[in-house]
Image (tube, rainbow, N blue to C red):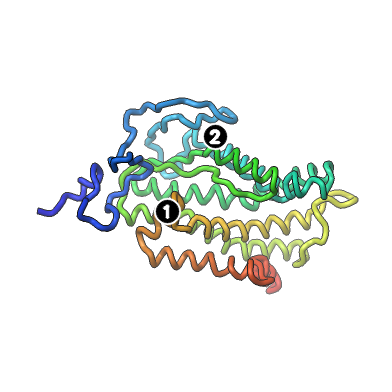
Amino acid sequence: MARDSRADIIDDDPFREKQSEIHRVHSQRDAGGTIHFNLSGESNSQQQGMWGVNFQQQPQMHDGGLWHFGEEEKRHLLLATGAFTLALGLMRVGGIIFGLPTMGTSAWLFTLILSLPVMLIAVGPAFILHEIGHKIVAKYYGCWAEFRSDPRGLKMGVGISAILGFVFMAPGAVMVAGNVTRRQNGHIAIAGPLVNLSLFLIGIPLGGLILVLMGTTEPSATGYLVEDGFNWQSMVWDAISFWVSANLILGLFNMMPFGPLDGLKVKDWNEGAWLGLVLIFAIPVIFWFSTPWSPMVLVVQFANLF
C-alpha cells in the first residue's frame, strides 16, 4: 500500500531521499526531528519593542482578502521601513567613522537628512513590494501571511551602518502559516525576487524619462549641498541609481540557496527556474563590479533615445 502523503504533515517519509512534498511553512523541528506547530493561540512570552511594536505577539488569524493588512503588520512594516531607510541614509554619508571626519558635523547631518527621502523613494519599494509579493502569493494559496520585523536585525543593521557606513541588515520577513506543496512553496518564494526584477526593468525607462525631463544625462559632480541651497539634480540621480542597483542586489541576494533565503525554496521546487533567475540577476551585477559598466548605463541609453 502506498504511503498517504498527508502523513508527511506529522512525520517525514523515512524512505524518501528528497524532502517531503508537503512543506511546513515557518514550523519548528526539535532535535529528534519532530515537527511542532503553535496552534494554541498563546505565545510563550510577550515583549514590547520599539515604537510600541510587539515582536512576540501571537498572530491573529483573519478572513481578509489578498490585500488585507493587519494593524500589527502595518506597525511592523513601518518600523522595518523606517529602520531600513535610516540605515541606507547612514550608508550614503559614510557612517560615523568614515563620513563624519571627512564631511564635518553640519554637512554630515544635513546630507543625512536629505538622504533619507532619497533612499525611501529609491529603495523602499524594493523592500516593501518584495515582501508584499510573498504575502499575496501565499494568501492566494490559502495561507495566512503577515510581515513581522526582526528587532535584532533592525538594531544590528542600523548600528553597523551608523558606525561603518555599509548596510548588512535583515529587517524581517513575511510569516506564512499553512501547508503547501513544494511547487506552491517555490511560487511563494520566487514572488519577491520577481518583484525586484520587475522594478529593475521598470526603473530603466522610468529613470530615463526623468533624466530627459531634467535635461541631463550626466551625474552631478557635487553632493546634495551647494552654496545656494540643495542640489536636486544629484538627489534625483541618486534616487534613480539606487532604484535600479538596489533591486538587482536584493534580488540576487535573496536568490542565494542558503538558510531562510528565497533561493533555497526556489531551488527545492525547480532548479532550472532558480538557476535562470540567478543568472538574470548575477550577470549585470558581475559586469557592474568587474568593469566600468553600471546599471545607470541602461537608464542613460534609454534617455538618449529621445
87 is higher (above) or lower (below) than 271: above
Q: Earlier in the sequence, mark 1 or mark 2?
A: 2
Give the spatial CA distance, label 1 vs label 2.
Answer: 23 Å
Q: Position of residue 80 (x, y in %)?
A: 57, 40
**Residue on which the image places disc 2:** 75
Count of all numbered marks drawn on residues in the image: 2
**Disc 2 marks which amino acid?**
Arg
Q: Residues within 10 Å of mark 1 (few under 14, many from 20)?
A: many
Q: Position of residue 73 (x, y in %)?
A: 49, 36
**Residue on which the image places disc 1:** 189
Q: Secondary structure at mark 1?
A: helix
78 relative position to 97: left or right: left
Q: Residue at left 43%, top 48%? A: 136
143 relative position to 262: left or right: left
Name the residue nearer the viewer: 220 or 88: 88
Q: Quadrant of the C terminus?
A: bottom right
